[in-house]
């Protein structure tokens, strides 16, 4: 480590310049094309060196030459580095700050890392730190450079156009009770036959295959059903299930299910149920 002693007036001037350099450095850091050459120190334009903070006892300052990253250029009066590839597809930044040396590290759960070694500090202490690139950057382990490439049309995956599947959708558009002769009725005499009728519609975007419409038992030993031919999209068809007897008097809910065998792949499998209110009289 190299020390240089300063008088009090030079020390005060250095501190004032350090504050100005810090403010300038913060402003420059906001630019995508510029960055301060002295990241861990304060730049002096008179000799082109970066100076660290004064040592507490000797007032000496560690100093090193202000250098930019490989390929970038230094503006000598301001101590600002200008990126050579600014505006290009990728930006590179040194993994280790100026004043620290880089050597190859290894790879852990976070990815590749490098060994950043500081110069001997006060008391001759040398420190090592395992450093990763920021998220979104890739470490070039041979050069110790973090490389970040912006997202653009050339390195983005082209969006995949997802087409909606064309599928049928079977549902009941109407349900009602009917006498065996086909006349609509509102009540059913106890023990007498009746029909549970429906209009089934395909409200999907593709034709269905054959399907079955089944009814609940409601006093029947075997649940009635009716097999239907396929329906084109937008088409509908009427049908009826035969109930040969009515249960004891009362009010009932008779359930109907379209595609009860689940033979048709539909865009909506949750609208296959229908209800008919059945009132049985004496």
Image (cartoon, rainbow, N blue to C red):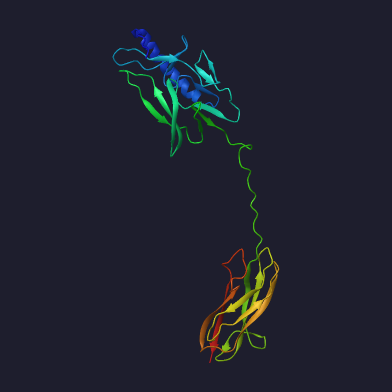
Residue 19: quadrant of the picture: top left
Q: How far from the left and from the top, in percent, is residue 106?
A: 44, 33
Q: How far from the left and from the top, in percent, is residue 196?
A: 61, 82
* Residue at 63% from the left image edge and 52% from the top image edge: 162
Residue at the limit of the structure toward the left, as seen here: 57
| Residue nearest the viewer, comparing 196 with 277 | 196
Residue 235 as seen in the image, left or right of residue 53: right
In the displayed structure, 254 sits above or below 40; it is: below
Residue 198 as seen in the image, left or right of residue 112: right
Image quadrant containing the N terminus:
top left
Q: How far from the left and from the top, in percent, is residue 193?
A: 60, 89
* Residue at 70% from the left image edge and 70% from the top image edge: 235
* Residue at 61% from the left image edge and 42% from the top image edge: 157
In the displayed structure, 244 sits above or below 91; it is: below
| Residue nearest the viewer, comparing 181 with 156 | 156
In the displayed structure, 159 sits above or below 244; it is: above
In the displayed structure, 261 sits above or below 98; it is: below
């Amino acid at each position: 480590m190299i020390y240089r002693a300063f008088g009090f007036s030079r020390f005060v001037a250095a501190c004032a310049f350090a504050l100005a350099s810090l403010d300038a450095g913060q402003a420059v850091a906001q630019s995508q094309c510029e960055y301060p050459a002295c990241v861990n120190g304060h730049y002096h334009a008179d000799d082109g060196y970066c100076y660290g903070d004064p040592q507490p006892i000797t007032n000496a300052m560690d100093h090193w030459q202000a250098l930019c990253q490989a390929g970038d250029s230094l503006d000598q009066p301001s101590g600002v580095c200008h990126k050579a590839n600014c505006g290009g597809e990728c930006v590179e930044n040194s993994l280790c700050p100026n004043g620290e040396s880089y050597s190859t590290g290894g790879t852990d759960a976070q990815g590749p890392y490098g060994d950043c070694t500081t110069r001997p500090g006060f008391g001759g202490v040398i420190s090592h730190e395992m450093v990763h690139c920021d998220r979104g950057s890739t470490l070039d382990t041979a050069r110790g450079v973090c490389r970040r490439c912006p997202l653009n049309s050339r390195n983005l995956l082209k969006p995949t156009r997802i087409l909606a599947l064309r599928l049928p959708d079977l549902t009941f558009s109407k349900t009602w009770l009917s006498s065996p002769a086909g006349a609509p009725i509102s009540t059913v005499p106890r023990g007498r036959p009746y029909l549970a009728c429906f209009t089934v519609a395909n409200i999907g975007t593709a034709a269905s295959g054959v399907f079955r419409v089944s009814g609940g038992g409601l006093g029947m030993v075997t649940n009635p059903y009716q097999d239907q031919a396929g329906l084109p999209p937008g088409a509908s068809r009427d049908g009826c299930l035969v109930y040969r007897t009515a249960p004891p008097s009362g009010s009932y809910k008779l359930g109907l299910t379209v595609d009860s065998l689940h033979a048709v792949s539909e865009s909506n499998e949750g609208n296959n149920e229908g209800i008919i209110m059945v009132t049985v009289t004496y």
